[in-house]
Image (cartoon, rainbow, N blue to C red):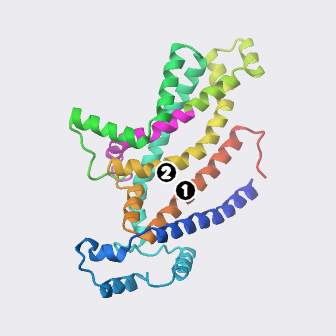
Amino acid sequence: MKEYIVRRLLLMVPTIFGAVTLIFLLMNILPGDIAMMILGEDTGQASPEQVARIREQLGLNRPLYVQYFSWLWGIVRLDFGNSLWTGQPVFHEIWIRLPITLTLISFSVLISAALAVPVGILAALRQDSWVDYGLRLFTISGLSIPSFWLGMLVILFLLIVFSWFPPLTYAVIYKDPWTSLQQLFLPALVLGYRQAAVSARMMRSSMLEVLKEDYVRTARAKGLMERTVVYLHALKNASLPVITIFGVEMVILFSGAVIIEKIFNVPGVGTLIVDAMGRRDIPLVQGVVLIIVGFVLIINLIVDLIYSWLDPRIRYH
């Protein structure tokens, strides 16, 4: 197991390298110049000499390959560089926003699990009944409705009915946990709805298959209570496909957080990367991508290890 973990950690390096390299190339292909934005592009008063001076100060006049390898060398030294827009260290810009995004995603996962497991189990136990049809409508709606559209509908409904506005500032979880959870509940609910729908459908299908297995029929033949059969014998094996798909859904959660944070005015990493891309702040975009890719890879590794723990037949070498 230790050798497997070490091997997976080493495989993360080329994955992160490829993702960051792709982002670097794409950001340099996109039109726009941060030097013009800093000087006030719309005024038309920026002279070529001023633009050249700003580009020299920011290091943008260097060849692309020099900028690229300079940034890679900084990563080796755990130095993400400075934001071209604010001049602050990239790590500092990310660090002050990262707890909010991680709280949002963690809260979304908890809401998703709290919805998906009972919905999937109940739909399987009441197969083809009105309960099953109603819960299937719930899950299909979650798969069909885009998160950003649902988020805007939630804001419009609360704005019109209750005159509610998204908060302009958000509390950090370790400073004010209760306020932070209250503020993040709605965006987390919108973000976690889709994952809950996917997981619930997978739980229903998996539970239907497991309930037909011989060991489940044997447990029922022994006279065990239905609750004991479902939760002690069937649920553990039925959860394996759900946990497998969870790693894939985490990628969607991180990408969805970018849009949801912008809609609900959440000052997290998602809002940060949208603003940085609009300003062509390449070091900041690369730093955020590096952090997100790292988190996704680590979460996928944890999911694989949990999968092995739940099913003793699976062993990684």
Q: How many marks?
A: 2
Q: Secondary structure at mark 2?
A: helix
Q: Residue visible at 51% across and 29% down?
A: 139
The x and y percentages for residue 92 are 41, 68
Dot 1, how many residues are within 10 Å of its Cα: few (below 14), some (14-19), or many (20+)? some
Visible residue check, residue 207: yes
Residues tagged 2 and 1 counted as in contact (Cβ below 8 A)? yes
Q: Which residues fall within the magenta stretch? A: 174-199
Q: Secondary structure at mark 1?
A: helix
Q: Which label belongs to residue 97?
A: none
In-image side of 295 versus 153 (left or right): right
Measured along the vertical axis of the image, is residue 76 above or below residue 229? below
The x and y percentages for residue 8 are 69, 58
Q: Which label belongs to residue 254?
A: 2
| Closer mark to the observer between disc 2 and disc 1 | 2
Measured along the vertical axis of the image, is residue 182 above or below residue 98? above
Main SS of the magenta segment? Answer: helix
Q: Which is nearer the N-term, disc 2 or disc 1?
A: 2
Measured along the vertical axis of the image, is residue 276 above or below residue 213? below
Most foreground residue, 108 or 129: 129
Visible residue check, residue 185: no
Q: Residue visible at 61% across and 65% down?
A: 18
In-image side of 232 versus 92 (left or right): right
Quick check: is 193 in the magenta stretch? yes
Dot 2, how many residues are within 10 Å of its Cα: few (below 14), some (14-19), or many (20+)? many
- Going by the numbered disc 2, the residue's amino acid type is Phe
Q: Residue visible at 23% across and 79% down?
A: 45
Most foreground residue, 17 or 218: 17
Residue 308 location, quadrant:
top right
From mark 2 to mark 1, how far is it between C-alphas?
A: 9 Å
Q: Pointer 1: what residue? A: 295
